[in-house]
Image: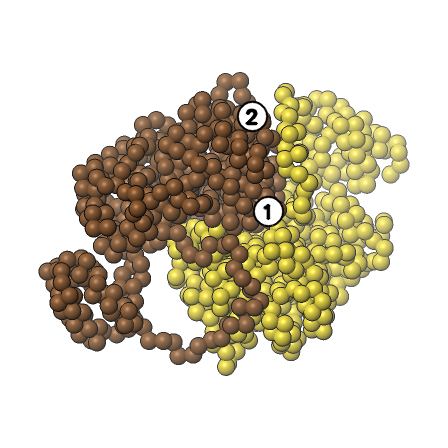
Chain colours: A yellow, B brown
Amino acid sequence: MNDDSTAMIVASLRTHIAASTPGTRLPSTRALVAEHRSSPVTVQRALRVLAAEGVLESRPGVGTFVRSAPTAKAHDYGWQTTTLGARTSTPARLPGALTEAANDVISLHGGYPDGSLLPERLVRSALARAGRGPTALVRPPVAGLPGLQTWFAAELSAATAPGNSGPTAADVVIVPGSQAGLSSILRAVGGGGRAVAMESPTYWGAIAAARHAGVTVVPVRSSATGPDPADVDRVLAESGARVFYAQPTWANPTGAQWSPQRSQDILDVVRSHGAFLIEDDWAHDFGIDAPARPLAGTDDSGHVIYLRSLTKSVSPAVRVAAVIARGPVRGRILADHTGESMYVSGVLQSAAFDVVTAPAWSTHVRRTREHLRARRDLLAGALRSHAPEAAVDAIPSGGLSLWVRLPEGSDAGDVASRCQDLGVMVGAGDDWFPTEPSGPHLRLTYCGADPGRYEEGASILGEVLRDS
Amino acid sequence: MNDDSTAMIVASLRTHIAASTPGTRLPSTRALVAEHRSSPVTVQRALRVLAAEGVLESRPGVGTFVRSAPTAKAHDYGWQTTTLGARTSTPARLPGALTEAANDVISLHGGYPDGSLLPERLVRSALARAGRGPTALVRPPVAGLPGLQTWFAAELSAATAPGNSGPTAADVVIVPGSQAGLSSILRAVGGGGRAVAMESPTYWGAIAAARHAGVTVVPVRSSATGPDPADVDRVLAESGARVFYAQPTWANPTGAQWSPQRSQDILDVVRSHGAFLIEDDWAHDFGIDAPARPLAGTDDSGHVIYLRSLTKSVSPAVRVAAVIARGPVRGRILADHTGESMYVSGVLQSAAFDVVTAPAWSTHVRRTREHLRARRDLLAGALRSHAPEAAVDAIPSGGLSLWVRLPEGSDAGDVASRCQDLGVMVGAGDDWFPTEPSGPHLRLTYCGADPGRYEEGASILGEVLRDS
């Protein structure tokens, strides 16, 4: 691992590059390590030398390529600079969680379950049926197909506490995914530059939706048991926010689940401020040690706006979610949805309905629970054995990821980038904070990579952490 | 048609209502006319009497129903009044064009082609194939499936004038329909309360999208040949708007098509202001006397943002559109799309690609052209014969509707509502004006109702107009 071996690899790669056409993909770091009987660090160093010379181009998560020749004619779009003006808060780049992973990479960063965890047979037959049915050629009502509205309402009603009345189909708006649903909710209740309170850390997509909707995010510190009701009270009082966005059940990324008492206390605080609680029940189908218990089931006063997506548990192609809201706010959300995207494809709605009403659906959800349990425990065990520096303070009872605390003084982004150079994708915790991170963290998901490679991934992470 | 016959129908209906459970649908106006050997006007009068008493309930476009009993428990969501605050500009109701028509109604108001004009066989087989393919279970790239991006770019490139370079796949963003695309474009270029210039009249969905995006609409008067370039110049100069939204080819609702010279002059004006022209090529597949000729084909300086949807011509279920933009603005639009809805279902993108690349697609577009020609001419003829008071100043060479000028002093909303009472749905022109209408108009579409009933529809319209 000295400079000589770096130089030898550089020389060898130069020959390889000279013989290649622009755009050719280089062998993976692992292949080069094997070929040169060298360490990954040395190979990476050699690649960086050549990238700095401009003969190589690294596409994170995809690979390293021989650089293509510049295009023939350069357009001048410089006039747009003045017209567009300064960037507002719209995020300029995709967060790490959306980065595409190449095939030979160990993916511990993505938030979407691997195909093996999806109800493939159900999805394919539902799509086939939908393609033959009436919804393939007509425009559905803007609020959604009545059958699907009814199913979402009935699911939440089944979780409604005695003494509360459950929602009905008329309280449901079908939206094209939870991201779109959240955008519409935030514009409807937090529009006009108002503030929205959010757990910190929280789902990066919600932070992005808030910036996108032009609302100011006011962070509320959260922990393994959820936010402190007194903190929520103080933040709502001081900021004037009338909306609190939260994930009470297996929060992304911390895995926190609010206790029934905590839920009641927070709901009382929200009510006392005449505010809304947006409950993003994103992990509804990913209960491991117990099924999800929506907080919305304890409210019929219109204070909880409930968001429930099928995209992660049914299929990323079935981009369908429901917003359940009661009172005038539901009309505002529907009006926003109509202005934004008019309606959701009836084919996707039919297919979603078909999947979740199939007898095999509940079997699938139970089977997934067992798979997720095994994966979660395997990843946690691999970290304990091979990366003890990465602390998992609480094993979540549901959801798709572990929230890992790194040693004081580590730089999460740097750790993630060095892991990536070595073929392991991890999520740098900073993406999940709407404000300065409370410390260096990683989010490691157990729903993506082949579990057979968790040990290898944990070893590489451990190596990187010890090398810091 | 005197008060006695009204009273007799009222009495008869009372007996009928007393014997019915709440929610029962009454026979249609046409059936009641036949039953009582009376005129539609008398039947309507009787129904209004009973509706005023609260025993009947009219659901526009659906029918008249025996009123349901009030629900058992009334929720109090009154606290939301204070929290939500005053309504901003979000439209409170759906425009007439989205009203559902009952089966026995003559629908001359909807903007979506009837199923008989859609490529049903192609759509069904494309959806079936997509359900079997890889996109049924994976998340596509946020900007869209590369194949579909390439197709959209190639289609516009084929219409690109010599001397200009056409767009490439990298200039394309796939969005979930043109409404969502327009929302993203307006937020990207007109955000922060800036002004957007729009033709007046113009597509009501664009007006809704502008209000929804929080941008101020500045109207530019348009005529049968499009807007006057001098007007565009003045409006851009005076309002500071840096965006002009227009439909240069078969504008909805006027049917106006800009001449090549007019297009060039307007594009020059837009360029001189360092502005963007949003070209909504909504009727691309609905050329009747000639194919569409996108204005974007004459620009490679990044001034034209091109919007092209497949929803109307392929199927309302295939909710897929493309935004083609060059320069930094494309990045802004993609960032907005990502924040809003993340990505478009891969199944819908695959199906769209499959339909438009099938050899039968161009045959279908040609066949549709012939159908639309016949329908357009039939409706125009029926109006000339049976409703000469409704003036069609120009027969459009493409698109889906006729723009009808009513006699001075008519109230378009009143005419539309009286036609609806008599079983004919027409679009009141006022919905298409971002400002005070220039006069009373109707938009009559020839893509919905059975053409065999155009004469009947025109007769009823004529009767209503003469009865004004």
Where does the image place residue A96, in percent across and percent down from the top left? 68, 48
Q: Nearer the viewer, residue B115 or B331?
A: B331
**In this view of the protein, which residue sits in the foreground, B180 or A49?**
B180
The image quarter in which residue A398 lies:
bottom right
Of all chains, the one bearing label 2 is: B
Residue A458 is left or right of residue B261, and the answer is right
Residue B172, which numbered label? Answer: none
The residue lying at 54 percent from left, 21 percent from top is B164
Q: How far apart are marks 1 and 2 (CA)?
A: 28 Å
Quadrant of the image for the N terminus of chain A?
Answer: top right
Q: Where is residue A252 in the image (x, y as percent from the top left)?
A: 65, 60
Q: Mark 1 lies on which chain?
A: B
**Label 2 crowd (10 A; few <14 / some 14-19 / many >=20):** many
Residue B274 showing in the rendered view: yes
Q: Which amino acid does label 1 sit on?
A: Gly
Horizontally, residue A379 falls left or right of residue A174, namely right
Q: Which residue is drawn at 21% across and 76% down?
A: B18
Find the residue positioned furthest to the left: B37
Looking at the rendered structure, the secondary structure element under dot 2 is loop
Task: Name the residue tied to disc 1.
Answer: B193
The mark nearer the N terminus, 1 or 2, is 1
Specify whether residue A31 is in view.
no
Crowd class of label 1 (few under 14; some 14 to 19; many from 20; radius 10 Å): few
* SS at circle 1: loop
Q: Where is residue B389 in the image (x, y as percent from the top left)?
A: 23, 41
Residue B383 position within the rendered picture, expressed as x and y whole percent measured from the top left: 22, 40
> Who's the residue at 70% across and 61% down the image?
A218
Residue where numbered disc 2 is placed: B300
- Give the farthest residue toward the top: B163
Note whether A5 is above or below A458 in the view shown: above
* Tag 2: amino acid: Asp
Q: Is residue B284 above or below residue A263?
A: above
